[in-house]
């Protein structure tokens, strides 16, 4: 689930742009997609320049770093885990590549991205045709992934796997800049126009004189398989993915939850920030008023993906401070986005009861996570997934809730507005046909 | 009957073709700077002659017309108008379709066009400022950026028509990117000053206009000095590349809906747009005391602040937009041209076919900003593929030499046109034609075109934006604030930039 961005200038005077700061603010907008590592690579003065740092974007890059970075083409990357990316290939030609997801090459995620980048570099230097090289690679390499590569020939190449698992959106600024990003909200933050998405199996190439697109034509017609987790949890609600507004999906999820698992209560509360649109949707349909139940402290930390248990607990405590007057003496519908280990939820429920909540009915805005992600999203190993071990009733007992239920798989598909066979539902335990 | 045309692009090829279709069966004569392969063919077929000539040289063009004893001259591009070619041809007693030098000011000077619009109180205006040097501009913008908030989001343009080049739009709304964007603005203004130093026919160099957003469209008209007759609306696409990304070009392709107005426009908007163009013609005729005989076009945009808004004007047909309308024209073009000369357009019924059209330009890589790279490549077209795909070919920036070889001249090499029930259908025909390899450069240099023009997604997007803008401007209209801009500046109070500018331009009365 890393965040990718590439920004490219066109026309006379294109070398005058300094794009490091644009990439930086784009990465800030994609920060929710990865908080362990951040990288900016630029092309300028005839060479690639890079800065790769651990931690949050605004800590990783200082004003001085940005000011010192030359370059009129830029790509940027944030990762939720320590990563070998950006991949830099030196020979037979220099390219820098960043990827989201997992191409089926080599063994682990990191090897496969290196192998992918090397094959791309080999192909391009052999044929001299970056567009066709990337297209062929997508035809040959299965898996769920998207990537952006920057070559020593001032080419920016972006592509999406055949199934459209990982998102990739296109934007522009005036008569000058084109951009490819993981999420459209990054374009908004840069004051850019959001134009459309890159289609599944499509490659886009920016070079100094043109923009070219090519569509992979594999032997077998591929299934569409868009990542449903993006809509539920990963993406920002102000993003649009493949033409579908993430906020809308989340509000619809809340509405469907209220229909699927109605319950009597005084107030609906969503756990910040992801579950707030769910709670508003739930409230609309159930007629139970929604309130803010928590105020957060510190920066946004995504607790489901923090590596160690200690950090997770710290994250929760810092993140969620219940607002006593909202919950004291009341029956609540408490909505969260997903349950992985149940740790976060247990702490939250306990905290709220201590502050005076009476009954707490927990509703989850997604189905139960019971399987690993085949496309590289880091979900804890199966034996750490609570929904694999326990049923809804048992989970309610463990987390201390009065009732507990997940969204159904069909509810999820309905909320996104796509058919079951157009979505990747692997993490919810649904096998692809 | 003998008719002479001037200019060597795709628009002129389309003009020559439309003239050749006439029932008057005219002999066609032509002058342009390169030998356009398509026009050359038509000239040969009708038994006329073709001369290579500097089209901005009034004496040379008028002498050719005299020598060939033509009955009328039709000017294609704008530069001959700016250089007084029409004046000289008419001076020698030969009727001419084209804007006289003084009338072509509407296109020559984007600054003067705007001044006339403001002075005559014609709607669809934009706030603007002009500068004679880069330093003036930088100094003034620094001094006034506090007092005039519209200066944050601007279009920077050369003050003169400069072949659709040099326009940049800078929206400086993100304070965290301010330094990058203001540096960019300054660099571009310096570039504009350099670029404009090549033109000595106007004093203003840099035009700064308020930035607006909305769908663009072109309204082309016939004018005979009394009557302005509107043609079907066309949408041109200025960005060089797919997705509306990249530098401004003369136009990479254009489409019409089936029928007179574009799918995303209303008839009322059409009427208002026509009224704006008509008022501009009346204003420039009053200013100059001359009569306008020829083509005129408003390059327009539907904007939240003004509704139909004038962005720029052409003293000619658009290119590629002219290719769309000439292909749709059912009335004999020569009849129309004669009516223009005799000032009796009002009594002529002009018909256009009810069909969607798409035109796409194909250009060598390097166009528009690195034209040296785009020049001098040998080109070839397989006309059987063009015909089989249901397309029509209009040669553009290409030269046919004496040995029969065609080479690129650095701009748009050619345009392809197709008809359809919908723009999507027409667009697909052109895509198929190009995919089959109809157009090639023989030395292996790359060509590009925009596959998205007239396609489903583009039309949906334009309609969406138009709907958003329409909601806003009609709301403003209902509230009686269409065209109003009000600022409030601490320690200064309320400011009305429209009133201020009107005062400045009319010498006191607001």
Image (spheres, grey):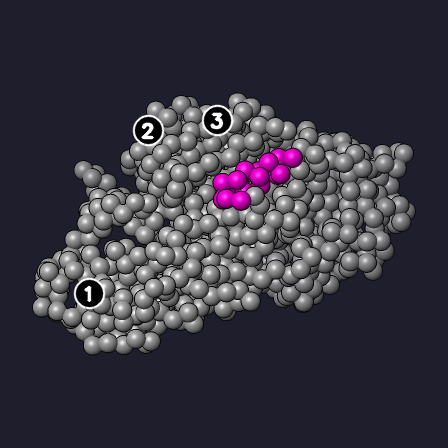
Q: Are marks 1 and 3 on the same chain?
A: yes
As drawn, B20 above or below A158: below
Residue picked out by circle 1: A400
Cα distance, mark 1 to mark 2?
A: 45 Å
Mark 1 vs 3: CB contact within 8 A? no
How many C-alpha atoms fall within 10 Å of the one at disc 3: few (<14), some, or many (≥20)? some
* Category of crowding for the residue at label 1, using alpha-carbon neighbours closer than 10 angstroms: few (below 14), some (14–19), many (at least 20): many
Q: At 27% from the left edge and 66% from the top edge, which residue is drawn?
A: A395
Majority secondary structure in the magenta region: helix
Q: Chain of mark 3?
A: A
- State the extent of the magenta-drawn residues as a range: A107-122
Quarter of the image for residue B251 reads top right
Query: Mark on residue A49?
Result: 3
Identify the element where label 3 is drawn: strand
Q: CA distance from mark 2 to mark 3?
A: 16 Å
Residue A95 x, y percent position in the rendering = 56, 32
User: Which residue, given by chain and number where applicable, does mark 2 sit on?
Assistant: A62
Is residue A104 among what the camera can see? yes
- For marks 2 and 3, the one nearer the N-term is 3
Compared across the picture, whether A28 is left or right of A360 comes to: right
- The vertical placement of B70 against B460, above or below, is above
Decide if residue B103 is on the left or right side of residue B382. Answer: left
Residue A267, picture quadrant: bottom left
**Percent coordinates x, y for residue B445 in the rendering:** 73, 35
Foreground label between 1 and 2: 1
Q: Are marks 2 and 3 in contact (CB under 8 Å)?
A: no
Q: Residue B289 has which mark?
A: none
Residue A266 against residue A233 in the figure, above or below:
below
**Between discs 1 and 2, the one toward the N terminus:** 2
Judge by depth and name the residue closer to the eye, B367 or B66: B367
**Quarter holding the C terminus of chain A?**
bottom right
Residue depicted at x 81% and y 45%: B381
């Amino acid at each position: 689930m890393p965040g990718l961005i590439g920004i490219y200038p066109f026309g006379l005077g294109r070398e005058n742009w300094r794009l490091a700061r644009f990439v930086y603010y784009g990465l800030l907008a994609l920060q929710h997609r990865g908080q362990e590592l951040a990288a900016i690579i630029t092309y300028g003065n005839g060479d690639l320049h890079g800065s790769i740092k651990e931690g949050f974007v605004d800590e990783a890059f200082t004003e001085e770093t940005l000011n010192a970075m030359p370059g009129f083409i830029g790509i940027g990357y944030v990762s939720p885990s320590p990563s070998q990316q950006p991949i830099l290939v030196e020979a037979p030609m220099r390219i820098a590549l960043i990827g989201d997801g997992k191409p089926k090459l080599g063994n682990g995620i990191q090897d496969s991205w290196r192998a992918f980048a090397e094959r791309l570099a080999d192909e391009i230097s052999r044929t001299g045709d970056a567009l066709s090289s990337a297209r062929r690679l997508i035809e040959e390499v299965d898996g769920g992934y998207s990537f952006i590569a920057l070559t020593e020939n001032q080419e920016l190449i972006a592509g999406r796997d055949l199934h459209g698992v990982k998102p990739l959106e296109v934007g522009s600024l005036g008569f000058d800049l084109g951009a490819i990003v993981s999420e459209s909200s990054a374009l908004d933050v840069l004051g850019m126009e959001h134009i459309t998405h890159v289609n599944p199996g499509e490659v886009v190439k920016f070079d100094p004189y043109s923009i070219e697109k090519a569509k992979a034509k594999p032997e077998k017609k591929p299934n569409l398989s868009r990542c449903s987790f993006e809509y539920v949890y990963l993406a920002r609600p102000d993003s649009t993915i493949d033409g579908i507004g993430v906020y809308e999906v989340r509000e619809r999820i809340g509405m469907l939850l209220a229909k699927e698992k109605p319950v009597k209560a005084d107030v609906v509360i969503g756990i910040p920030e992801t579950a707030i649109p769910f709670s508003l949707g739930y409230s609309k349909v159930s007629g139970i008023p929604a309130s803010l139940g928590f105020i957060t402290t510190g920066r946004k930390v995504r607790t489901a993906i923090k590596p160690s248990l200690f950090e997770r607990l710290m994250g929760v405590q810092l993140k969620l401070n219940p607002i006593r007057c909202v919950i004291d003496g009341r029956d609540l519908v408490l909505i969260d986005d997903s349950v992985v280990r149940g740790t976060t939820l247990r702490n939250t429920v306990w905290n709220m009861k201590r502050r005076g909540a009476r009954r707490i009915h927990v509703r989850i805005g997604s189905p139960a996570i019971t399987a690993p992600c085949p496309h590289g999203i880091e979900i804890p190993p199966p034996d750490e997934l609570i929904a694999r071990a326990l049923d809804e009733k048992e989970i309610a007992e463990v987390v201390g809730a009065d009732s507990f239920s997940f969204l159904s798989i069909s509810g999820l598909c309905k909320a996104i507005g796509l058919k079951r066979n157009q979505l990747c539902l692997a993490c919810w335990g649904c096998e692809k046909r | 009957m003998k008719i002479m045309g001037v200019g060597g692009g795709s628009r002129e090829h389309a003009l020559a073709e439309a003239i050749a279709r006439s029932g008057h069966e005219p002999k066609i004569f032509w002058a342009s700077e390169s030998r356009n392969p398509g026009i050359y063919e038509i000239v040969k077929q009708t038994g006329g002659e073709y001369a290579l000539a500097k089209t901005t040289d009034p004496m040379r063009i008028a002498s050719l017309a005299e020598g060939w004893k033509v009955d009328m001259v039709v000017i294609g591009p704008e530069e001959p108008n700016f250089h007084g070619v029409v004046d000289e041809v008419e001076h020698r007693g030969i009727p001419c379709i084209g804007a006289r030098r003084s009338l072509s000011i509407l296109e020559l000077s984007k600054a003067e066009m705007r001044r006339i619009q403001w002075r005559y109180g014609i709607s669809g205006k934009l706030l603007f400022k002009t500068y004679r040097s880069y330093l003036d501009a930088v100094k003034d913008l620094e001094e006034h950026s506090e007092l005039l908030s519209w200066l944050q989001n601007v279009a920077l343009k050369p003050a003169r028509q400069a072949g659709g080049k040099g326009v940049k739009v800078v929206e400086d709304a993100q304070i965290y990117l301010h330094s990058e964007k203001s540096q960019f603005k300054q660099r571009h203004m310096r570039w504009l000053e350099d670029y404009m130093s090549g033109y000595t026919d106007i004093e203003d160099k840099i035009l700064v206009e308020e930035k607006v957003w909305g769908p663009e469209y072109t309204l082309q008209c016939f004018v005979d000095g009394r009557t302005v007759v509107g043609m079907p609306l066309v949408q041109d696409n200025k960005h060089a590349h797919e997705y509306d990304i990249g530098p401004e070009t003369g136009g990479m392709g254009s489409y019409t809906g089936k029928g007179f107005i574009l799918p995303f426009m209303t008839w009322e908007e059409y009427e208002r747009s026509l009224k704006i163009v008509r008022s501009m013609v009346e204003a420039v005729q009053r200013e100059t005391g001359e009569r306008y005989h020829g083509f005129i076009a408003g390059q327009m945009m539907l904007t939240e602040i003004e509704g139909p808004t004038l962005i720029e004007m052409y003293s000619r047909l658009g290119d590629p937009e002219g290719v769309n309308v000439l292909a749709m024209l059912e009335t004999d073009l020569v009849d129309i041209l004669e009516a223009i000369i005799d000032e009796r357009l009002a009594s002529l019924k002009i018909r256009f076919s009810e069909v969607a059209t798409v035109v796409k330009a194909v250009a060598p890589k390097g166009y528009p900003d690195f034209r040296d790279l785009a020049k001098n490549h040998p080109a070839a077209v397989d006309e059987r593929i063009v015909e089989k795909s249901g397309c029509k070919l209009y040669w553009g920036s290409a030269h046919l030499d004496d040995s029969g070889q065609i080479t690129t001249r650095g701009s748009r090499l050619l345009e392809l046109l197709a008809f359809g029930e919908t723009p999507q259908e027409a667009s697909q025909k052109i895509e198929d034609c190009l995919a089959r390899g109809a157009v090639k450069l023989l030395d292996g240099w790359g060509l590009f075109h925009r596959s998205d023009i007239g396609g489903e997604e583009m039309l949906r997007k334009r309609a969406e934006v138009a709907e958003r803008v329409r909601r806003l401007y009609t709301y403003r209209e209902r509230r009686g604030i269409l065209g109003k801009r009000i600022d409030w500046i601490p320690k200064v109070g309320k400011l009305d930039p429209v009133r201020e500018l009107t005062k400045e331009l009319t010498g006191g009365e607001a």
